[in-house]
Amino acid sequence: MAIIGGGIYIVDGDHIVSGNSLSGNTAFEFGGGIYVSGHGMMVVSSNQILSNAVTFTDAFGYGGGVYVDGGNLTFSDN
């Protein structure tokens, strides 16, 4: 299990994530499936994002499927 970004962890830069299956990933705090932070452009399209989880049960713990903290995200057909 990752602390953040169980399936995909991205910080800064321009990225395209397309045509993937992200399933059964786990993070402790943020982004069980995908975590995005920083600057840049990210396109997430035509993916299957299923059954991902964040396990932290206190006041924090966000984004079982996707967590975005900054950047410019285009999210479609997932």
Image (spheres, rainbow, N blue to C red):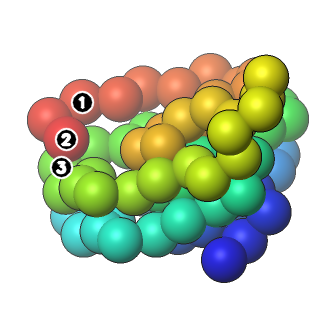
Front residue of 18/31: it is 31
* Among the 4 quarters of the image, the one containing residue 74: top left
Residue 46's tag is 3
* Among the 4 quarters of the image, the one containing residue 41: top right
As measured in the structure, the alpha-carbon distance from the residue carrying label 3 to the one carrying label 1 is 7 Å
Residue 41's tag is none
Relative image position of residue 28 (x, y in whole percent): 72, 57
As measured in the structure, the alpha-carbon distance from the residue carrying label 1 to the one carrying label 2 is 6 Å
Q: Residue at x 48, y 43 (%)?
A: 64
Relative image position of residue 65 (x, y in whole percent): 42, 44
As shown in the figure, which amino acid type bears the numbered disc 2?
Asn
Image quarter hosting the C terminus: top left
2 and 3 marks in contact (CB < 8 Å): yes
Residue 76's tag is 1
Q: Residue at x 62, y 22 (%)?
A: 72
- Residue 33's place in the image compared with 43, above or below, is below
- Residue 78's place in the image compared with 21, above or below, is above
Residue 49 seen in the figure: yes
Query: Where is mark 2, residue-wise?
Result: 78
Judged from the image, the secondary structure of the residue bearing numbered disc 2 is loop
Total numbered badges shown on the rendered structure: 3
Left or right placement of residue 36 versus residue 51 in this view: right
Q: Residue at x 35, y 71 (%)?
A: 24
As measured in the structure, the alpha-carbon distance from the residue carrying label 2 to the one carrying label 3 is 5 Å
3 and 1 marks in contact (CB < 8 Å): yes
Q: Earlier in the sequence, mark 3 or mark 1?
A: 3
As shown in the figure, which amino acid type bears the numbered disc 3?
Ser
Judged from the image, the secondary structure of the residue bearing numbered disc 3 is loop
Image quarter hosting the N terminus: bottom right
1 and 2 marks in contact (CB < 8 Å): yes
